[in-house]
Image: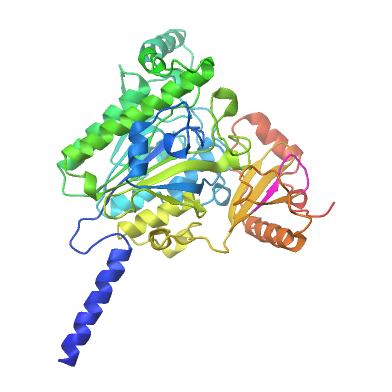
Amino acid sequence: MKTHTKLLSALSSLALLIGSAGIHASEQKPNIILIVADDLGYADVGFNGSKDIITPNIDDLAKSGTSFSDAYVAHPFCGPSRAALMTGRYPHKIGSQFNLPTRGSNVGVPTDAKFISKLLNENNYFTGALGKWHMGDAPQYHPNKRGFDEYYGFLGGGHNYFPDQYQLQYKKQKAQGLKNIFEYITPLEHNGKEVKETQYITDALSREAVNFVDKAADKKNSFFLYLAYNAPHVPLQAKDEDMAMFPNIKNKDRKTYAAMVYAVDRGVGKLVETLKKNNQYDNTLIVFMSDNGGKLSKGANNFPLKAGKGSTQEGGFRVPMLFHWPKHVPAGKRFSHPVSALDLYPTFAALAGAKVEENQHLDGTNMWPAFIKNENPHKDEPIYALRHRKGYSDAAIRMNQWKALKVNQQPWQLFNIENDISEKHDVSKSNKALLTDMVREMEKWSWDNQQPKWFHETTEGANWRLDAMPRFDKTFKTTK
């Protein structure tokens, strides 16, 4: 009898353990959809307080799920941020801390860094990537070689939105015999084969997301979908009917930007409808986020954060984010502890029951247990941002309520970011020991950073060498 009781107790404990990871023993592994908007401002979705841009479908997910107030990406601009999402590594650890050169270069995110798509695919997930890639266009870096069964989109860092316009430009340049054609006007592709797109690009990506989910419904596997919209990244191009939704916005850039965000929201709505139609909705974790902060000069609003895309101030790498998964993600909640995009890789792996190899050395943490308990998954642990500029680097450290910041070759500052989200009141003078300790930890973190494997432009590479970068002796100096 005692043995029987012990067995029941052990089984009960095991069930609780499995349940705490978000998966019950009787359930299929969850589908996972990661939706990434491009250069979306912190305050440009309703769930983060937008006053002029409406995002009803995204907001519905936030209302029936959990939104994040303190979500950070691993780098304040596109390419490095995406490399971090896919690899679970700070881009500086794998030499991916700059945007890739324009199309046609033979470089990309190192192939020895296993993408989350590859790990999930090896664990019987049907995988798809849609939209912006920006992690290498040579064959060995192609999405289909990085664990994605399906890919539809463009391999570069951006694209024009209206096919009738960019296809005409491409045709003219092709007829002239030009080889270095601007990547924003090149044809889209499906699994390596060029396609002739007919729809506004955001709508086309939404269409393909619906097609992927429909295709996944015919399979026994769970699925992972990486939906990488290029909106609202420049060029600012929107449909007239979407522009008409914002009659009260007079600034042209802001109005166009708002319409582009609205098109993304429409796509999210169609995706959710398809999940419901296929009875996949209840077993799908949806993550929505931006790849970095909004670009203030191109219509974005990061209020109340300071600065924008490219900055290590809050507006550069603190982004809107939500989780949605019925009966698993708390409904109508706001998670106010700091989390990192680096946490998504180990979290997705844990939810999928996929084992991460020890030699992968992921930089994030499985945040799910702390998330469910509404606890800080990074208690007393730093989250870093490092952006290299000409001759110097900007840096930031977020730990608990504190934010250490160095920008524009000025001395380090310290903010109580919970009380001072706009970084207005430097409290470094009254917390010198704390600031020094935080900076020393980041300096140690930097010791195994790799030299960049590429630069966005040749001048960047030349300046890097001329300036003897990264010059961390200057970055981590805490005294005048």
Could you tell me how many numbered marks the image carries? 0
Q: Nearer the viewer, residue 141 or 72?
A: 72
- Kindly identify the residue that appears in the image at 21 percent across and 64 percent down: 25
- Kindly identify the residue that appears in the image at 23 percent across and 35 percent down: 273
Q: Is residue 291 magenta?
A: no
Q: Quadrant of the N terminus?
A: bottom left
- Pick out the residue farthest to the right: 480
Q: Nearer the viewer, residue 198 or 425?
A: 425
Indicate whether 164 appears above or below 467.
above
Q: Position of residue 244 (x, y in %)?
A: 39, 14
Indicate whether 55 appears above or below 12.
above
Q: Position of residue 378 (x, y in %)?
A: 52, 60
Indicate whether 10 appears above or below 469.
below
Magenta part of the chain? 403-411
* Scheme of image coloration: rainbow
Left or right? Give the position of 338 relative to 423. Answer: left
- Kindly identify the residue that appears in the image at 69 percent across and 43 percent down: 424
Q: Is residue 215 visible?
A: no
Q: Position of residue 427 (x, y in %)?
A: 73, 53
Indicate whether 438 appears above or below 13.
above
Left or right? Give the position of 154 relative to 225. Answer: right
Left or right? Give the position of 89 relative to 223. Answer: right
- Kindly identify the residue that appears in the image at 67 percent across and 30 percent down: 459
Q: Is residue 210 visible?
A: yes
- Image quadrant where residue 310 sits: top right
- Pick out the residue farthest to the bottom: 2
Q: Position of residue 391 (x, y in %)?
A: 75, 39
